[in-house]
Amino acid sequence: MKSLFMKHFSEIVLAGAFFAALLAPITLPAQQAKPWEQIPTPRLHDFTPQQPKRIALKNGIVLFLQEDHELPFVSGSVSIPGGARDEDAAKTGLISLYGQAWRTSGTAKLSGDALDDLLEAKAAHIETGGDVDSTALSWDSLKGDADQVFALAMDLLFHPQFSAEKLQLAQQLVATEIMRRNDDEGGIASRESAKLVYGANSPYTRQPEFATIGAVSVDDLKAWHDRTIGGKLIVSISGDFDPAAMEAKLRAAFEALLPVKAAPPRHDAIAGPKPGVFFIDKEDVNQSNVQIVGLGTDRHNPDVPALAVMNEILGGSFASRLFQKVRTELGLAYAVGGSYGYAWDHPGEFHAVVMTKSVSTVDATKAALAEIAGLTAKPFTEEELARAKDNILNSFLFRYDTREKVLAERVRLEFYGYPPDYLETYKAALEKVSVADLNRVATKYIHPDKLAILVVGNGPEIKPGLDELKLGPGQTVDITIPMPKQPEGPGQKQ
Amino acid sequence: MQSKNIPWFCKGAGALILAAMALAGARAQDLKSFEQRITTKVLPNGLTLVICERPEAPVFSYSTFIDAGDVNDPSGQSGLAHMFEHLAFKGTSQIGTKDYAAEKIALAKVEAANDAYEAEYLKAVGRDPAKLAELKKAFKEAEAEAHKYVIPNQFTDVAERNGAEGLNAETQLDETIYFWSMPENRLELWAWLESGRLADVVPREFYKERDVVNEERRTHTDSNPIGRLVEQLLATAYVAHNYGRSAIGWPSEVSQINATEAMEFHKKYYVGSNIVVAVVGDVKASDALPMLERYFSKIPTGPKPEEMTTVEPKQFAEKTVAIREQTQPFYLEGYHRPDYRSPDAEVYDAITDIMSDGRVSRLYRSLVRDAQIAAEAEGFSPFPGDKYPGLFAFYAVPLPGHTPAEMRDAIHKEIDKLKNADVSDEELAMYKTRTRADLLRGLADNQGLANSLAQYQTRYGDWRELFLQLDKVDKVTKADIRRVANEVFVPSNRTESWIETEAAGKTLTAQQDGGAQ
């Protein structure tokens, strides 16, 4: 279950960590002896990651089996194409409601509550959820309970019973999130900066409102389920199971389904942000959250490997230009980072973030902007290239050091239609990136004049003011939450 | 696409062994199998190495566990342990410098300049603004001079170029933990880096880093409604013990910590007897130990730092904290409970599980599902630490239109049930089953396992306790739960805190920064 409180909690209990999960430095000159360079690096132990067995059924459904007998557990999931970007704008929030109510309603045979009791007594789980481009059903249990839990999961997949009561419960939870969305400075900043890039009503950024979640009915949930369940399902199983028996069981469950309906190709036309400075006032903070955003690309773009190396140099490591300048040299931020984004099947965002005390908002923003502009103005060096490649390639192993990760990667590639050897070809391409490539992609993709800057912060404390950025008159973004018209609706009884 | 989330060490404290025994047949999960794969070695300087062989992939993870955190910060220096943690990434006399001999002299000048500035700044009477400005300028010049010798971020750079993954550190109240994962062929390089920074830290770029830490405080505490509430709750619940003190540090203190203080902290707490280093992965103990011993023997020998004398006195006054501001309502309360060594430690875990874990939990069913007044409601413990007596806390997030008072009353009603009637057989059995399974699930993760082994070795003097404590889990009874609930969940032992939403325009602006900067 998603927790509004617990997601922040580890950060609060912690006195602190060395860095925030955003982000990387630059060094060269002659110095004293480098004792670490004398330490030998032996040849890495041979390692061939175990690939899952892929089975393509005649109807188009794909199964993956990944054996792993280290621990006595079996887990599985079914990925279903179609997510929040595909929902009716007037019913924004449908996927979130569906993801909750699917599981909490249960099936004709077993209510969601009864399912909770049964599973938790076995330390087993079956969960459902949805995100921007897919929904999923997943389960896990001890080996001894695996057959029963699989049967329950299939019952939920094929015979869900959406209930009005559980839909209403989900609506209340989403209403609580809506009501609270302006309490969290970081949440406001990432949400509103994405709207600047994709547009406020785009499938990638529109947000649930009281009216749109109130418009969702049980019939809508059923219709969504019936429609998407006919798509190209990807079923993946991992853990301590017998592969022949498991394959037979999966075939029995999925082979007789109708041929899958392919999803139409997407044509997301995204203009990118209107350049300029945008501001959101928040009176209860003493730190500005500065977002610098623009349009990115998708992973099909052959320049992605060069962009990945450029990102490492810009903000990907402790030695990156942004970290080095804004945090280490200037001490203006704890959290600073940035990258030119690429999504799997639609344009990502260029996105840099710096969080700094109110009075240094302008200085920190200018420093970050200078590093971004420096991507085209300050030529990349062989030293930077070598460092970035070392960083990426020497830790590349961690993309497939567990069977679970190998499986997840294969499912992802299958879902987005990439070849199964994508990681290998991607790695080979990374190895070939040159300084000339970096200079070329920086010139091609980095356009400081097309970026939007969003500052969320405490207006009266921001001195000097944002006009000192000299990027034109700032625009205030209204984030007022539209309240429901019905007096009995959520959020009214103040 | 969503990624699957398999919970790791959910409770941080564990329970494995019984699970392993109950699930005979599976390999690699019982104490015996771990005993065969784990080598423990106490070096002459007192430092303990724990090596667990898990050659699933050619990688390893490590966890360095320092038995000192912000609870150990001296009076007036809250945030010091955390400040030192940041320093530990700045390199040593051998890495991060162009010329250490010259840098050392320059750093001493920085410290002297800072002392002079602070002395003027802290004058209660007769502070001279012109002199202060001059001293500030002199400090900045000394800092710039020292900076000439710095090779910034070289320590982390060498680690990252050699494949370090998940490189970070955390300072808790009770402990400081450093960790990352690496390809197995960098084991010796890691040993050089890690032992070097533990033994030979240099107060490089200290004052810049202090600014960074002040930004960290603004993010997590000042600019976060729940961060503000938690800090106030703890400051109110505790009258004597350092658990009541801001963990990241009060702004006036954390902004005036100096490098000399940080180095004194290091000298006292970063001694062999106070450090456990656990390594898990594709490492062969028989090959690696002589090398590791050579590097980690560099860490100074020193007496185990004395234990704290302060014990939080018994609370007798019920307390409340109310914040009125323009954020959404929230409720959080805490009751004092004993530390992790208490014979009832597992009873508290059982209460947490039964009250809070998942859609079967009592608080979810009562406040979220049935009464429909909260979006979530849970109890958790121990908080904010486990080494010393902490709190058993409960919180609830009200649905729109519901108030903190309703949350409080509904939580108290559930607590009363726990006091007045036994939990069911099913609930108790569920706690035991889930605890075992959760622990077992954590065993296949190098980093999680390294953290747990280091933690248990430190807290119990023996990593085996990670497994052995399942015996205690199994012995928890319904009567224990009822007894503990009646002992602890009483009004005189309680601090309540909440956020109440106030109309726009009435709230004070955010807290001002204190301090010298």
Image (cartoon, coloured by chain):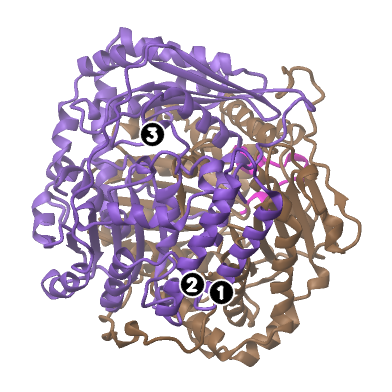
Image x and y of residue A246, in percent: 30, 56
Q: Nearer the viewer, residue B308 or B76?
A: B76
| CB-based contact (under 8 Å), mark 1 and mark 2 | yes
What is the three-letter code of the residue carrying label 1?
Glu
Identify the residue position indicated by label 2 in the image: B106
Question: Which tag, 1 or 2, sits closer to the chain's start?
Answer: 2
Same chain for marks 3 and 1? yes
Category of crowding for the residue at label 3, using alpha-carbon neighbours closer than 10 angstroms: few (below 14), some (14–19), many (at least 20): many
- Tell me which residue sits at (20%, 32%) in the image: B341
Question: Which callout, 3 or 1, points at the residue further toward the start of the chain?
Answer: 1
Visible residue check, residue A230: no
Task: Please tell me which residue is depicted at 42% across the width and 60% down the height of the picture.
Answer: B168
Q: Are marks 3 and 1 in contact (CB under 8 Å)?
A: no
Report the magenta stretch's main SS. helix
Q: Which residue is mark 3?
A: B242
Measured as percent of width and height from the top left, residue B215 is found at 59, 51
Task: Judge whether B98 appears above or below B274 on screen.
Answer: below
